[in-house]
Amino acid sequence: MLVTINTTDTQNIDWAATGAAEIVQNVFTLINTFTYEVAYDRTIGIPGSFIDMPTPEAVPIVVERIYTLIDECEPRATVEDVIFAGLSEDGTLIFEVVIDV
């Protein structure tokens, strides 16, 4: 089952999620977490070092990290595609991540 996750979506945590819903929720959390935000595993997340970079330099860094992060931290999901969808009004990079669950 293919699922597209947009990094700008909001999602409430479903503590009782199981199966595909749990995997999608885990991937959403991973791609919306910066490194050093998780107290007991500071390496989980997207590095913040790209923030002040020009967009053409930042996008490949984030795309590569999304593939690696999901592969390492949520092996039940397979990344099919990561699409740069543009910038939000405040300059945040927007990505759509397509996963196979």
Image: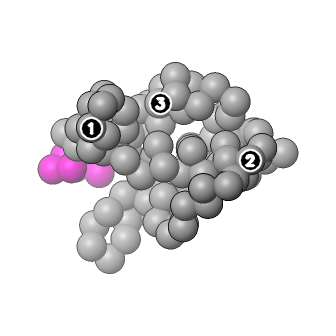
Q: Give the range drawn in magenta.
A: 50-56
Disc 1 marks a residue whose amino acid type is: Ala
Q: Where is residue 61 in the image (x, y as percent from the top left)?
A: 35, 35
User: Which label is found at residue 18?
Assistant: 2
- Residue contact at pointers 2 and 3, CB within 8 angstroms: no
User: Which label is found at residue 39?
Assistant: 1
Q: Residue at x 32, y 29 (%)?
A: 41
Q: In the picture, residue 36 is in which quadrant?
A: top left
* Observer-nearest of 66 and 16: 16
As helix, strand or loop, the secondary structure at mark 3 comes to helix
* Observer-nearest of 51 and 17: 17
Q: Where is residue 100 in the image (x, y as percent from the top left)?
A: 75, 39
Q: Which residue lies furthest to the left in this view?
A: 52
Q: Which residue lies furthest to the top in this view?
A: 72
Q: Residue furthest front?
A: 16
Labels 2, 3: front one: 2
Which numbered disc flags the more N-terminal residue, 2 or 1? 2
Marks 2/3: CA distance? Answer: 21 Å
Disc 3 marks a residue whose amino acid type is: Leu
Residue 11, can we see it? yes
Q: Position of residue 26 (x, y in %)?
A: 57, 45
Magenta stretch containing residue 63, yes or no?
no
Disc 2 marks a residue whose amino acid type is: Thr
Q: How are the colours assigned in the image? A: one colour
- Residue contact at pointers 2 and 1, CB within 8 angstroms: no
User: Which label is found at residue 69?
Assistant: 3
